[in-house]
Amino acid sequence: MAPPFGDFEAVKQDILAILKNKDYDDGSIGPVIVRLAWHASGTYSKEDDTGGSNGAGMRYEEEGGDPANAGLQHARAFLEPIKKKHDWITYADLWTLAGVTAIKAMDGPEIPWKPGRTDFSNTKYVPPRGRLPDAAQGSDHLRHIFYRMGFNDQEIVALSGGHNLGRCHKDRSGFDGPWVVNPTRFSNAFFKLLLSLKWEPRKWDGPFQYSAYAPGMDEDDEPLMMLPTDYALIQDEKFRPWVEKYAADKDLFFADFSKVFAKLIELGVYRDEDGIARCDKRDEKGSYRSAPKKSDTATGPSRI
Ligand code: HEM
């Protein structure tokens, strides 16, 4: 590794050590960490080359306070002791490294990861709010959001397989429940369940979502859920064949997910010959500038 970098392997080991947490959700902080890596990256726009994981803009209220990022303060706070211990690492590298490390640790594929992202020192390049997907919408919206990042239909379906992990929280997104029976193990169950269960609109005092019980579950169990955007994947004639392929072939899904997640966390990351990212494509040279401390309230424990 080039000189400004420290020991990434040591950071990875420290991430692995905190993933299991019996007091949190389903016993792992892995899913919310994966969501942090995705939301850090999913602001990218190829139209003006802004957004993406470089810069770790979520440290600033402008981005961290986007309602779409509700709940991710927990993920950032979980990683804070690791940032303190390895203070040379940038938040932007830490969040993305934590995401790929968590996916692998939860039995998912190995995802290529490269260091070199920098941390913005001000809000100049922080992307505007509203760039992340709205789960209440359908396939037109998914295309609008993900084409802006430079993804195609197959990649949209593969990325949506991130919902093999974790759950929705009423106090964060308003939606509620897990997608799969074992939400801390990465698999292709999300696609299989999407096709095989009888999804019904949930009758409840909350936003429109689908609900179903898997075979072997009874009424006392917490039902599984699908968001409108998840269900759109089987309603849309171009998305659906990919759902069918990924449901039938776990290896294909793992291979495609690995590629597309690696692409996601590289969006808008332009490195010079030392591997150091520039704040902006037009900047001449970057520096590996880690934020020295929590630079805003959006990262602080006060928001938990
Ligand atoms: C396709 C558009 C997407 C929409 C509309 C969407 C929406 C959501 C919503 C509403 C939640 C629940 C948040 C909460 O209440 O805590 C969620 C959770 C999650 N999403 Fe997505 N998401 C999308 C794509 C993705 C992608 C591309 C990934 C990763 C590859 C991903 C990974 C996750 C994970 C792991 C969770 C669980 C977080 C936790 O357990 O705390 N999502 N998503």
Image: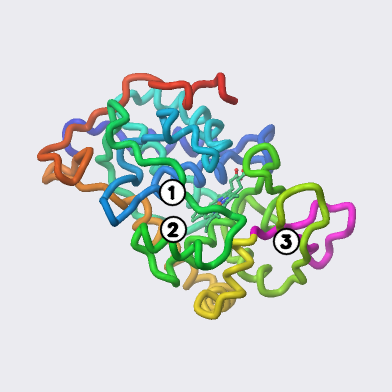
Q: How would you rate the neighbour count of disc 3 (Cα within 10 Å): few for under 14, some for 14-19, many for 20 or more?
A: many
Q: Quadrant of the N terminus?
A: top left
- From the Cβ of disc 2, is ligand 1 less than 8 Å away? yes
Left or right of 176, for residue 249 = left
Q: Which residues are magenta?
A: 211-227
Q: Residue at x 47, y 49 (%)?
A: 132
Q: How would you rate the neighbour count of disc 1 (Cα within 10 Å): few for under 14, some for 14-19, many for 20 or more?
A: some
- Whichever of callouts 1 and 3 sits on the residue coming sooner in the sequence is 1
Dot 1 amino acid type: Arg
Dot 2 amino acid type: Ile
Instruction: Name the spot of residue 238 as percent of width and height, x first.
Output: 50, 78
Left or right of 137, for residue 114 = left
Instruction: Name the spot of residue 164 as percent of width and height, x first.
Output: 60, 58
Q: SS class of the residue under badge 3?
A: strand
- Whichever of callouts 3 and 2 sits on the residue coming sooner in the sequence is 2
Name the mark nearer the viewer: 3 or 2: 2
Instruction: Name the spot of residue 176 as percent of width and height, x first.
Output: 71, 48
Dot 3 amino acid type: Tyr
For the residues labelled 2 and 1, say whether their Cβ atoms are less than 8 Å apart.
Answer: yes
Name the mark nearer the viewer: 1 or 3: 1
Residue 145: which disc? 2
Q: Which sits in the foreground, 189 or 151? A: 151
Residue identified by numbered label 3: 210
Left or right of 200, for residue 3 = left
Q: Residue at x 79, y 58 (%)?
A: 202
Residue identified by numbered label 1: 131
